[in-house]
Image: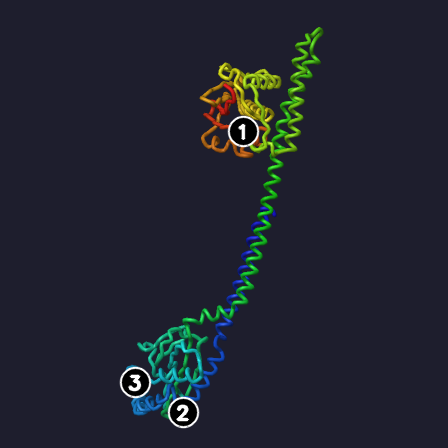
């Protein structure tokens, strides 16, 4: 999996979630519209039978007729003479009619009787509504007599109505039980639209979700499986990437270190070729010893490239060495590869005289060489100076390597030991940003402490604190 594939995966997830959401939403809407279909059919049939010769509830037609019939003549007179007076009269009439219908309603007892008789859900709530009330003077044209600004008017889901009885708060097409229109095509009559709604709002959602359980389970399972597969794929990719990077970084670092011994051997060989006879055996022996040490170092480099676990502190092979002798050997070998404008100076060597340190010689030499390489590479002085000094405190000794290079800023000091880190000043210089990372890893494997002091344009100081074996 590549980084460019991650946005594609995210988009795929969004599409998957959107499809699943639409599936669940549409299923819920379908279940909601079909909720308690059988109960609604039963209640509709029972309610219609109850009102075969009536309106709203038993006895409501008589109430309406007794109030509206004596008013036909006055309604007709005002309608033809004054619309304002007609509207005021209609408002007063509706107040009287609706108040009386509410006061004398027996719908509560009727509805509960229907529920019990038909063994319906006892938690059902209802609402009895008038959705329209009109009168006609000629049996053809009908006129609204419920003012739109009446205080009795309620509006939900773009539908206006008057509640006569019931406690159902949510009125919608899904809980409509019965909708009836009753009229008589005769002069001086009226037309009334009314409806009955019933629902169990408290448990409706839970019941629908329960009905949808298989769909939800399938949907969530598919999402979890897809996310799980992606996570496993991504985790395996990360692990593989880390292993590849670790191997590649180590091999790059070791390859970086091949240059010093090869250069040293080349210089020693050239020195032998340019020697004039007679040459003392001691001089020849000194040069051949240098070549031999560098050959051994190359062999160890190859071995190190094949065995990265040597940087593990639990498997690190360490031996005791006299520190001053080892450092003298390291510095003398390194000097052979230097140009004329670079010096390495050793100060106060008496501090570490006869001090023994337990370490892995190959890794220690590589660490010192890496610090030397950086001191020279990041140095623009005419004369590049590397100064090696020593500090001893109780049972610890520190090797201090100071240079007169370009130095480091505070920000660079915090990141200098990170893998592949290269400051802005090193962009044009060769390297992989692995030298000081390798130094840190060697120090960690030996359980040494690293300290760094640096200042821009004044150079840097590296301290390597090690445990003393023998004073």
Secondary structure at badge 2 equals loop
* Mark-to-mark CA distance, 1 and 3: 98 Å
User: In the visual, does 126 lie left or right of 220?
Assistant: left
Q: What residue did someone put label 1 on? A: 446
Horizontal and vertical percent position of residue 257: 62, 27
Residue 184 location in percent, x, y? Answer: 41, 91
Q: Residue at x 54, y 67 (%)?
A: 214
Q: Is residue 210 above or below residue 12?
A: below
Query: Where residue 334 appears, x then y in whole percent?
Result: 60, 19
Q: Quadrant of residue 162?
A: bottom left
Asked whether residue 66 is in view, the answer is yes
- Camera-side residue of 187 and 277: 277
Compared to residue 434, the image places residue 15 above or below, namely below
Q: How many marks?
A: 3
The residue tagged 3 is 100
Front in this rendered view, residue 312 or 187: 312
Quadrant of the rendered structure where residue 160 is?
bottom left
Q: Is residue 286 above or below residue 305?
A: above
Give the mark, 2 or 1, whose residue is nearer the N terminus: 2
Mark 2–mark 1 contact, CB under 8 Å?
no
The residue under the point 60% across, 50% down is: 233
Give the Cα distance between marks 2 and 3: 20 Å
How dense is the environment of label 1, judged by Cα within 10 Å: few (below 14), some, or many (20 and up)?
A: many
Q: Is residue 154 left or right of residue 253?
A: left
**Disc 1 or 3, which lies upstream in sequence?**
3
- Residue at numbered disc 2: 53
Residue at 34% x, 83% y is: 145
Residue 240 percent coordinates (x, y):
61, 43
In this view, the mark in front (1 or 3): 1
In this view, the residue in front, 276 or 138, is 276
């Amino acid at each position: 999996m590549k980084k460019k594939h991650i946005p594609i995966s995210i988009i795929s997830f969004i599409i998957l979630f959107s499809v699943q959401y639409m599936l669940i939403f549409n299923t819920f809407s379908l279940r909601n519209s079909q909720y308690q279909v059988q109960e609604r059919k039963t209640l509709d049939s029972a309610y219609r039978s109850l009102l075969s010769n009536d309106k709203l509830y038993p006895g409501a037609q008589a109430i309406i007729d007794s109030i509206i019939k004596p008013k036909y003549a006055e309604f007709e007179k005002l309608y033809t003479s004054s619309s304002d007076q007609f509207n005021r009269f209609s408002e007063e009439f509706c107040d009287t009619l609706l108040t009386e219908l509410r006061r004398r309603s027996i719908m509560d007892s009727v509805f509960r009787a229907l529920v019990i008789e038909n063994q319906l859900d006892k938690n059902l709530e209802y609402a009895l509504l008038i959705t329209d009330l009109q009168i006609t003077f000629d049996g053809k044209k009908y006129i609204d007599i419920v003012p739109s600004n009446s205080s009795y008017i309620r509006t939900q889901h773009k539908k206006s109505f008057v509640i006569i009885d019931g406690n159902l708060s949510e009125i919608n097409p899904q809980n409509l039980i019965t909708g009836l229109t009753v009229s008589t095509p005769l002069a001086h009559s009226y037309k009334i639209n009314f409806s009955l709604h019933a629902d169990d709002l408290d448990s409706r959602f839970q019941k629908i979700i329960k009905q949808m359980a298989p769909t939800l389970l399938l949907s969530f399972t598919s999402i979890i499986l897809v996310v799980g597969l992606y996570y496993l794929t991504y985790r395996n990719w990360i692990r593989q990437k880390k292993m590849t990077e670790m191997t590649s970084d180590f091999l790059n670092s070791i390859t970086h270190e091949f240059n010093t011994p090869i250069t040293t051997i080349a210089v020693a060989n050239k020195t032998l070729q340019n020697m004039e006879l007679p040459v003392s055996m001691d001089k020849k022996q000194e040069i051949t010893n240098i070549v031999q040490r560098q050959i051994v170092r190359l062999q160890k480099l190859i071995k190190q490239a094949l065995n990265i676990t040597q940087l593990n502190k639990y498997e690190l092979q360490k031996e005791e060495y006299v520190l001053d002798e080892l450092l003298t050997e390291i510095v003398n070998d390194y000097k052979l590869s230097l140009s004329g404008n670079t010096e390495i100076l050793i100060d106060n060597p008496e501090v570490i005289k006869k001090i023994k340190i337990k370490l892995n010689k190959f890794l220690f030499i590589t660490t010192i060489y890496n610090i030397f390489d950086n001191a020279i590479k990041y140095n623009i002085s005419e004369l590049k100076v590397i100064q090696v000094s020593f500090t001893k405190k109780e049972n610890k000794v520190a090797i201090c390597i100071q240079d007169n290079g370009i130095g480091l800023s505070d920000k660079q000091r915090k990141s200098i030991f990170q893998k592949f880190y290269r400051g802005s000043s090193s962009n044009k210089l060769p390297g992989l940003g692995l030298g000081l990372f390798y130094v840190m890893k060697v120090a960690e494997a030996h359980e040494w402490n690293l300290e760094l002091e640096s200042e821009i344009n004044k150079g840097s100081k590296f301290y390597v604190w090690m445990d003393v074996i023998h004073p």
